[in-house]
Image (cartoon, rainbow, N blue to C red):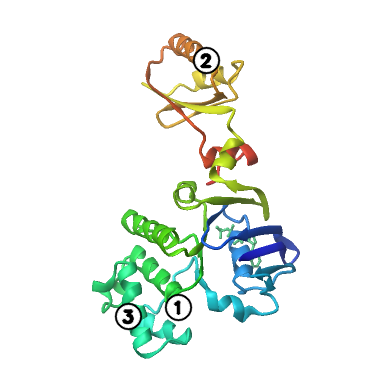
Amino acid sequence: MLETEVLSKVFKGKVAVDGVSLYLDKGESVGLLGPNGAGKSTTISMMSSLIKPTSGDVKLHGKSVVNDPDSIRKVLGMVPQEIALYEELTAYENLKFFGRIYGLKGEVLKKAIQNILELVGLEDRQKEVISTYSGGMKRRINMAVAMLHDPEVLIMDEPTVGVDPQSRSHILEMVRKLNREKGLTVLYTSHYMEEVERLCDRVYIMDYGKVIASGTKEELKSILSGEETIWIDLDRGSPNLVMELQGFEGIQQSTETEKGLKLIVPKGSKLLGKVFQAAERHEVQILNVNVQIPTLEDVFLHLTGRKLRD
Ligand SMILES: Nc1ncnc2c1ncn2[C@@H]1O[C@H](COP(=O)(O)OP(=O)(O)OP(=O)(O)O)[C@@H](O)[C@H]1O
């Protein structure tokens, strides 16, 4: 229903988005993942017609949004990265104000406000001014504003940055429910891999303005299907052991972790015996061994050679 075609944006000679083609089918929950500066915000700003592309197009049901920005504004809810609320007004007053901008009024507006307040779990706080809200509560009202006109597509730009765990969980649950139960189409940008894993069916990974991988979570993880990660807890840190293991045949990567070390090895390789012997040589005790299937974080590391939160 919504797609971008070789979308690019250049700011003063600097390429922020470089030929991005992605699509959202109706009812899908799609993740747009990438480190800071990857071009996620610029991409979704073009998708929601907030900024014009340098080249390429955005299409809603096959029709250009660039030529007809109003078409997307009617069906889209956009949750910006920054809180865009009037601090000195109550939550109710904020929703009333933004509801009128969407063209809602009277009983319809009142009902929409109560429905949305219930959805974000803040109906009992609606008469309090926004300046008294916690960061997480402000985020929930920010989302309520975006959903007041009952949009078909919800685009969220890192909605959980700086949010307390309770509100974070509430936001994720709410979005999941809206997607699964009401068929809301969702595009969720984040640099938190675990949020995207929890919420999204399909994922685009962006880096330096380009989509470097895309597919279902399972498809992306299958890039690493030949590997497994082994987490080993040690009784003390041992950089020398980590270094020695890096040189072992069959060990693709050996890194130090908070509790010990992490190894990436070919699936089914029987290297643990050798690891135990090496630990003994370094007089380090192995406390726990945990073998894990790959995560999207591992996929990102594999594709870019960098961690997502560098
Ligand atoms: N208005 C602008 N003028 C100049 N450069 C910009 C502008 N907006 C974004 N950029 C640059 O474009 C690149 C992509 O930025 P963008 O905000 O889209 O990335 P992002 O993946 O959303 O990162 P973040 O998570 O930090 O928002 C960055 O190098 C950024 O500095």
> Among all residues in the image, which is located at the extreme bottom?
106
Whether the residue under disc 3 has CB within 8 Å of ligand 1:
no
Q: Which mark is residue 92?
A: 3
- For marks 2 and 3, give the CA distance: 61 Å
* Badge 3 amino acid: Tyr
* Residue at x-position 61% and y-position 78%: 71
Residue in the picture at 76% in, 64% down: 13
* Residue type marked 1: His
Residue 125: where, in percent of width, then height?
Answer: 25, 73
Residue designated by label 1: 149
Question: Which mark, residue 271?
Answer: 2
Counting residues from the start of the chain, the first of labels 2 and 1 encountered is 1
- SS of the residue under disc 1: loop
Give percent across and percent down for residue 115.
Answer: 33, 74
Is residue 214 or residue 301 the one in the foreground? 214
Could you say where residue 152 lies in the image, as x and y percent from the top left?
51, 70
**Mark 2 to mark 1 CA distance (whole Å):** 57 Å
